[in-house]
Image (spheres, rainbow, N blue to C red):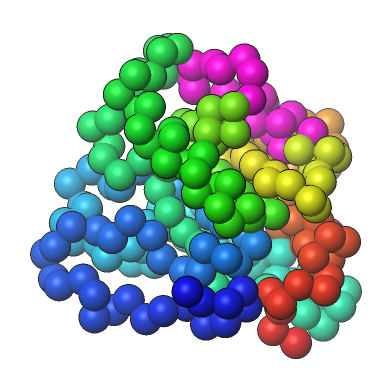
Amino acid sequence: MQKRGTAPLLFKNIVAKGSKMIDSVGDPQFPIWLVGDSPPKNWDQELETPLDARHPARHNIWTSVADYMQDVLYREKSLRLNTANLYIRNAISKVELKPGKEELSWPRLQEEIESWNDRLQKYKPRAVLTFGAFAFELLRRAEKEEPPRPFGNWGTRELGAAFRERLRLYNPLQVNVVPLLHVSIARGRFLHSHRYFVGGEGSSEPNYFDYVGNKLAILFMQHMAKEKIWIT
């Protein structure tokens, strides 16, 4: 098992071309995790890892946030987050298991939810960044948060409010699940997504990526300053 802060295992040679996407990449002992939605439909036989860097979704939902975050970290503390060690995984292993937006009961996902609970209890990551409503709700259920909700209830406004509340109540001694946006930030109503997620805290022309990147940078500087997560 790798020690926290060490380089992740190389995975390039593990997956043969055309084989099924592996379940995860990175170091599960790293205190920051990224949780995507599910393997991209029709591409899981071509892509190697969750949030594969060759797929545009990664850059639409994470790279732009990370760029703003790294800029703040460098300007404020001459630091960079070692993103090479991030533990990255999709919420579910098969997109076919995903329930409908208005479904409250998820019997087909009980095994996946229990596996997530075991994983979180074993490694206890400090910040689990979830992308989109479904990943956020599944991790809520894994953490046994009440009440469960259909993931369609988590609109962009609701996710933004939950983001602010999770940062306000952040506890460095426990697992903290923090929601970010998924595809809504890259679709036709993307300007609405910027405004709805940021809410009243933004400028007249809010930038979701700038807003979230700044908030995460401050969070990590305040609560993980002594962790082995930095490139100095």
Residue 127 in percent (x, y) is at 67, 52
Q: Identify the residue shown where x is 51% and y is 69%.
A: 27
Q: Which residues are magenta?
A: 145-165
Query: Looking at this view, is 157 or 229 the one in front?
Result: 229
Q: Is residue 127 magenta?
A: no
| 17 horizontally vs 11: left or right | left
Q: Is residue 161 magenta?
A: yes
Residue 85 in percent (x, y) is at 54, 73
Residue 230 in percent (x, y) is at 71, 78
| 191 horizontally vs 70: left or right | left
One can see residue 131 in this view: no
Q: Identify the residue shown where x is 60% and y is 67%.
A: 30
| 11 horizontally vs 64: left or right | left
Q: Main secondary structure of the magenta part?
A: helix
Q: In the image, is residue 166 above or below residue 12?
A: above
Q: Quadrant of the C terminus?
A: bottom right
